[in-house]
Image (cartoon, grey):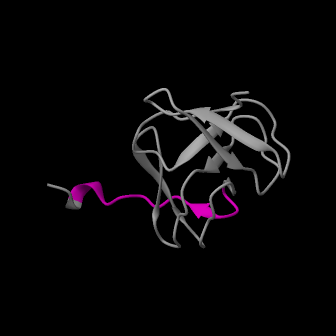
């Protein structure tokens, strides 16, 4: 049963569309229509993020195809992705040409 969504093909997280318990199978349909599954390593609240790839410390977290933060530590596939293991960093927009 589908219980999470991917928003953009670049994303390394999916979004839970119902509460998910640790150990549950998380199913989502990729953008090609294939059913994908990961095992939840944590309890996940509805609308929170779950890693669908390993995310190395200091790597970007990508949702909506955009960088939304950086991993504070290594994050494993199936792990809850939230402010306990990520942080936002403002870009210096003036430095971008």
Quarter holding the N terminus is top right
Q: Report x, y in % for residue 31.
A: 45, 30
Q: Quadrant of residue 32?
A: top left
Secondary structure, magenta segment, majority class: loop
| Residue 93 sits inside the magenta stretch | yes
Image side of residue 6 versus residue 97, left or right: right
Observer-nearest residue: 86 or 1?
Answer: 1
Q: Report x, y in % for residue 46.
A: 76, 35
Which residue is painted at 59% across and 41% down in the image? 14
Q: Quadrant of residue 94?
A: bottom left
Observer-nearest residue: 93 or 88?
Answer: 88
Q: Report x, y in % for residue 25.
A: 76, 43
| Numbered marks: total | 0
Observer-nearest residue: 94 or 44?
Answer: 44
| Residue 11 sits inside the magenta stretch | no
Which residue is painted at 79% across and 41% down in the image? 45
Q: Residue furthest front?
A: 34
Which residue is painted at 57% across and 62% down in the image? 87
Q: Residue furthest left?
A: 97
Q: Report x, y in % for residue 2.
A: 69, 28
Observer-nearest residue: 16 or 53?
Answer: 53
Residue 76, above or below 82:
below
Quarter holding the C terminus is bottom left
Q: Quadrant of residue 10?
A: top left
Residue 11, above or below 41:
above
Q: Which residues are magenta?
A: 83-94
Which residue is painted at 65% across and 43% down in the image? 37
Image side of residue 15 versus residue 32, left or right: right
């Amino acid at each position: 049963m589908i219980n999470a969504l991917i928003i953009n093909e670049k994303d390394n997280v999916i979004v839970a569309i119902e509460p998910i318990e640790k150990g549950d199978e998380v199913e989502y349909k990729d953008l090609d229509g294939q059913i994908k599954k990961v095992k939840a390593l944590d309890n996940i609240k509805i609308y929170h993020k779950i890693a669908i790839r390993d995310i190395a410390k200091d790597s970007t977290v990508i949702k909506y195809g955009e960088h939304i933060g950086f991993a504070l530590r290594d994050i494993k596939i199936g792990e809850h992705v939230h402010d306990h293991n990520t942080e936002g960093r403002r870009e210096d927009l003036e430095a971008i040409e």
